[in-house]
Image (cartoon, rainbow, N blue to C red):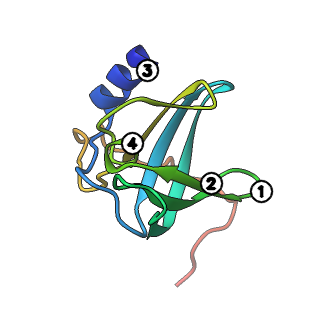
Amino acid sequence: MEQIVTELRKIMKFKETAMEGDVVIIAMDNPESIVYGLVTGFERDTSRKDEWYHVTLQLLLMPPQEVTWTLRVPQFSGEEIFTMGGDKRFIAPIDFSFTHPPLAPMPEPMEKKTGLRLVK
């Protein structure tokens, strides 16, 4: 998981904290996968002494799937790799203001011969 997170940090820019409406990347080791999720809500878990939150995510799968995970801030803001049920997970909010180097310009479309001619 550590290597996957290192590679993700090379190709994506992450925000420092997640907010409602953010798109997050979720890496899991069992099953080994990377998915996107939309943060749809946070609710403080008052039953715990430390600061834990019920984080509701809409996993952007087919079909979309809603999950609510109880996490600490470092766990849903990309600060640490954590485990759920013994399986490693990583969640980080994506910073879409990150710009990639410009791509090569698109080639000009070839002229199509239609067999029709313009008569004025």
Q: Specify the amino acid type for callout 3.
A: Ile
Q: Residue at x 33, y 47 (%)?
A: 77
Residue 111 in sight in this render? no
Which marked residue is nearer to the observer: mark 4 or mark 3?
4
Q: Residue furthest top?
A: 3
**Measured Cα–Cα span from mark 4 to mark 3:** 16 Å
Q: Specify the amino acid type for callout 4.
A: Gln
Q: Which residue is mark 3?
A: 4
Which marked residue is nearer to the observer: mark 2 or mark 4?
4
Q: Are marks 1 and 3 in contact (CB under 8 Å)?
A: no
The earlier-in-sequence mark between 2 and 4 is: 2
Residue in the foreground of this view, choosing between 62 and 83: 83
Q: Residue at x 32, y 37 (%)?
A: 12
Which marked residue is nearer to the observer: mark 4 or mark 1?
4
Circle 1 — which element?
A: loop
Residue in the foreground of this view, choosing between 45 and 91: 45
Residue 26 in sight in this render? yes
Q: Which residue is mark 2?
A: 60
**Measured Cα–Cα span from mark 1 to mark 3:** 25 Å
Q: Specify the amino acid type for callout 2.
A: Leu
Numbered circle sitting on residue 63: 1
The reply, left or right, for residue 9 in relation to residue 1 is left
The earlier-in-sequence mark between 4 and 1 is: 1
**Measured Cα–Cα span from mark 2 to mark 1:** 8 Å
Q: Specify the amino acid type for callout 1.
A: Pro
- Horizontal and vertical percent for residue 1? 47, 19
**Measured Cα–Cα span from mark 4 to mark 1:** 25 Å
- Horizontal and vertical percent for residue 56? 55, 62
Circle 4 — which element?
A: helix
- Horizontal and vertical percent for residue 80? 34, 33
Q: Which residue is mark 4?
A: 75
**Measured Cα–Cα span from mark 2 to mark 4:** 19 Å
